[in-house]
Every structure is written in C-alpha cells, then in structure tokens.
Image (cartoon, grey):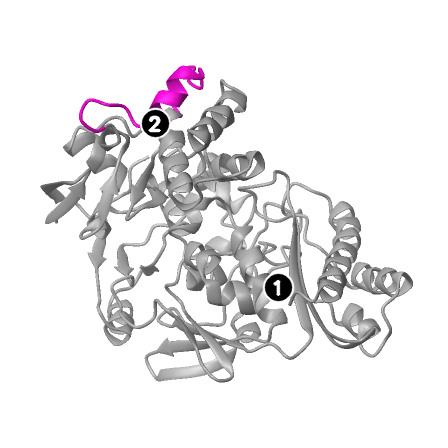
C-alpha cells in the first residue's frame, strides 16, 4: 500500500507547528504515526499536508518536579516502560503503556498521540473495503447516518486508548498549546464524548506536556485490560483503578473505564460505594455491580453490549483485587 | 518534492533522494536494494518489516523515510560480521526455526533488540517479546527455542 502524495513540514517550535496547521487546510500533525499511518494508507483519511512535530525540542523528556511528574507529549510508550522514575512512582502508567499493541509500535508511538488516539469504528475503519462512494456518508465522515447500528442517531465510534484511563484516575492535567498560547486543563476535558469528533481540542491545538500529580501516601493503582489475544489487540474493556487505602479503610477511589464509549468513562457509582468503606469481598462485589449498572457499552468491537457489560463486572472485580493485593504487599 | 537525506544503514552512509510519502521500508527495499527486510501487511500489524532504529525494534512500514535522518538503522543484512553469521541467525538455522522464511528477518531483528536489553529472559518473556511478529508456519515453538538457546550460549 503506497501513501498518496502530500506536503510535508518539520517545524522546530510549537508556535510554528500551530501556524503551519492554521495556514494549511486538510492538514494533520504527525508524531509516532502508528494511529495515522494505517488509516492514511487505507485511504480512510486523506490529509493533504503532514506536519511532523517530532523535531520540536523540549517536549520529549520526563521531568520530576516537586508536586508533579511532567511527561513530554513526544515521549514514546517504550520510553515510559523503560523509565526507572515512572516505574518507581507510577507503576500503573507503565502497566498501561506496556499493554498497548506490540514492542515495535510502542517504540514509535508517543504518549500525546496515544491520548489523542482517534475513536475506532468497525465500519469507518474498514470503509475502504466497502466502496464508500455508493454508501451514504456516515456521521464520522460528516454525513448523518450510522452504518453500524441501524437507525443510530449519532456516531458510535469507541475511544479505546489504554493510557488515558490510568492518567484520568491519577487526576492528570495536560498542557495544551494553540494559537492563543498555552493552557493547562484537566485531561478529562479533552474528551468530548462524541464518536465523530472525539476531542474538544481545536484542529490547531496540540498537547505539549502531561502533568501527573505525585501520588498521595499509601495510594495504589493498576490497569487491567481484557482483549482477545495477550498482545497486539485493543481492549474490549480496560479498567484503571487508583485507591488510597489507610489500614483497611478506603479513603479515596478512582475508577475509569476505556473502550466502553466514545470517551473514557468514570465509574462514579462504583467509586462512591468504596469511599470510606472497609475492604471486604462483599464490598468488591458491590462496587463491581455498581459499575455493571452504570456502564452502557457501545457494541463496536464485534462483541454484544450484553457481553461487554458482563465483562465490566468481572474486570472491575479483578482490578480491585489487584489493587488491594498491591496495598497488602506495600507496592504502590 | 524529493528531498536528499543521509541514511545511516548498517554502518554505511547513503545519500538518497526521497519523496515525503515514501516509507523507510520502501527506501530500504527499492532504493538501497536491501530486500532482506520484508513487506507483508504494510499496516503495522505483522512485524515482517522490523528493523532496529538506534537499537530499538521499529516497523519500517510505519515510518516515513524523511523522518529517519540522523538515526542509525540496522537491518538483517547488517547482522553477520566478517562472513560469520550472528548467533541468532545460526541458532534459527540450527534449530529449524525457519520454514517459509518470510517472517524470519523481522523475527530475528525483534529478538536481537530484545536480547540486547535482556540477555537472560525466561520462556514467557521471549514469547511476549516476539508477540508482534506473526509466523504462519512454525507454530513459534522452534523460534522460541532458537532465541532461548542464544541466551544460554
């Protein structure tokens, strides 16, 4: 599969990257390229201009500051796995990064790109096979019909990034750079929840840095991922749990799910059951049931919504058990 | 428009004129005639085109050639030194880890990057390391065996 022709730029500063994308319509940022390239090759997307942001300096390192760990958007998932600092402070981020795709892809895929990974759809991603010209345009292509769910009223493409739920559970912030300068927002704000327009960022905006607040004492996290094969695959469901546990009492709980909707979802009910309660098998069961009640999965993986919902229960349970085992072992 | 870039492949410097839409894989195979690196899915799923970039295993089909300037690329052709096969190549040969051979160059490059980082892996670690390289003939048993035998050597 050959790539079609496109214009190519390599800006060296964030400012010139933003200016270039403002000047060129139908342009896209290129970092690791692992999400963009396959779609571009298949003709699912057709940017006329690619702006390679990898030459930009200052956003490709991991820095420790007093209250934050700052990870540059260009840091690759492979570098996160190998970073002694992140392994020590946030093993759950490493778990999530390690669960993405394969080693070869992780060595090129960047954290910023992973967070802004496009939503996936069984129809849209494979639309090159179906002779697009004779089909009515789907929501994601700017039309108003869904070819996946009959009479679907909106785009049902699924967000299935692995690292985002972990960073959301850790209350991470992102530094976004655009035409009006820099702004620091909570990571959850960049997800719009719409399948066809998954991000609230403007086309010219990009993530420069990810700020993760240092962990509270005696807090423990994990990421569990359910997928077809032990490697390569996207999650059918992914669960990040982050609990603060004092003796046997849960002080604080954050549970985020990925791959169940067009944005990562916080299992609010499951969290509130846990907060202030004492650890017990019943409690884990109760919390998992709350997640089961709340989550309304989108059947866009080849699995029924019923099945994904059942698996949410199983994997929330597994995530909580894993965190509590970590707490008992004293591993953060 | 084509751009002239310097590619450092297997320790040799090449000046090549590349168009922005050429991937590293296309340039390696078609311009430098290094056809040991294979093209298969061309979509980043199979691992056939694995090469090492600054020591890390990456997929040559997912990387634009213009983006590789200043990096050191190692392909399967650069493994043998002084007419002597690399230990991994030898063990793949001796253990019969090759059937049709199409996945082999990618498999060996992934294994090399992995063993360089982790010289003493367990069987499960080896299996995980090569999980990004698909082989449709061998069933992987002999490939894992071949990689493990290099570790003991």
Residue A315 visible in rendering: yes
| B14 with respect to A174 (left or right) | left
Disc 1: host chain? A
Identify which residue, A173 or A21, lies in the foreground. Answer: A173
Q: Is residue A93 magenta?
A: no
Quarter holding the N terminus of chain A is top left
Residue A198 visible in rendering: no
Q: Where does label 1 land, which residue?
A: A264
Q: Tell me the tag on residue B87.
A: 2
Disc 2: host chain? B
Q: Residue drawn 71% across and 62% down?
A: A326
Q: Main secondary structure of the magenta part?
A: loop
Q: CA distance from mark 2 to mark 1?
A: 46 Å
Identify which residue, A112 or A157, lies in the foreground. Answer: A112
Vertically, is B103 above or below B114? above
Query: Start and end of the magenta stretch?
Result: B81-103
Q: Position of residue A224 (x, y in %)?
A: 66, 54
């Amino acid at each position: 599969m050959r790539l079609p022709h496109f214009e190519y730029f390599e800006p060296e500063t964030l400012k010139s990257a933003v200016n270039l994308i403002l000047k060129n319509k139908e342009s896209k940022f290129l970092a690791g390229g692992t999400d963009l390239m396959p779609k571009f090759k298949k003709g699912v997307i057709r940017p006329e201009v690619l702006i390679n942001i990898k030459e930009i300096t200052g956003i490709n390192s991991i820095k420790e500051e007093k209250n934050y760990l700052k990870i540059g958007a260009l840091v690759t998932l492979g570098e996160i796995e190998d970073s002694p600092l992140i392994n020590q402070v946030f093993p759950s981020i490493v778990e999530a990064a390690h669960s993405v795709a394969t080693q070869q892809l992780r060595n090129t895929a960047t954290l910023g790109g992973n967070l802004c990974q496009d939503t996936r759809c069984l129809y849209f991603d494979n639309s090159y096979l179906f002779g697009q010209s004779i089909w009515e345009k789907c929501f994601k292509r700017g039309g108003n019909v869904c070819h996946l769910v009959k009479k679907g009223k909106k785009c049902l493409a699924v967000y299935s990034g692995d690292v985002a739920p972990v960073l959301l559970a850790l209350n991470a912030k992102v530094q976004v750079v655009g035409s009006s300068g820099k702004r620091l927002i909570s990571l959850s704000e960049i997800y719009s929840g719409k399948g066809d327009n998954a991000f609230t960022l403007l086309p010219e905006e990009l993530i420069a840095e990810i700020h993760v607040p240092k962990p509270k004492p005696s807090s423990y996290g994990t990421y569990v991922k359910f997928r077809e094969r032990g490697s390569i695959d996207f999650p059918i469901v992914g669960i990040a749990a982050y609990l603060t546990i004092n003796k046997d009492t849960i002080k604080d709980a954050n549970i985020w799910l990925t791959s169940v909707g067009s944005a990562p979802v916080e299992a609010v009910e499951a969290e509130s059951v846990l907060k202030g309660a004492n650890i017990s098998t019943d409690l884990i069961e109760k919390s998992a049931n709350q997640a089961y009640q709340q989550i309304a999965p989108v059947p866009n993986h080849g699995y029924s919504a019923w099945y994904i919902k059942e698996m949410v229960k199983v994997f929330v349970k597994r995530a909580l058990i894993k965190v509590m085992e970590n707490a008992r072992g004293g591993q953060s | 428009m084509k751009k002239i870039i310097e590619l450092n492949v297997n320790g040799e410097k090449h000046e090549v004129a590349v168009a922005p839409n050429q991937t590293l894989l296309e340039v390696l195979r078609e311009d430098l005639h290094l056809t040991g690196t294979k093209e298969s899915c061309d979509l980043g799923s199979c691992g056939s085109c694995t090469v090492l970039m600054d020591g890390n295993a990456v997929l040559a089909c997912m990387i634009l050639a213009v983006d590789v300037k200043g990096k050191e690329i190692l392909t399967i052709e650069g493994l043998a030194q002084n007419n002597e096969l690399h230990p991994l190549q030898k063990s793949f040969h001796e253990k019969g880890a090759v059937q049709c051979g199409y996945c082999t160059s990618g498999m060996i490059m992934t294994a090399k990057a992995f063993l360089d980082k982790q010289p003493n892996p367990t069987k499960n670690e080896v299996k995980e390391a090569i999980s990004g390289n698909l082989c449709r003939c061998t069933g992987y048993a002999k490939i894992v065996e071949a990689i493990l035998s290099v570790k003991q050597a």
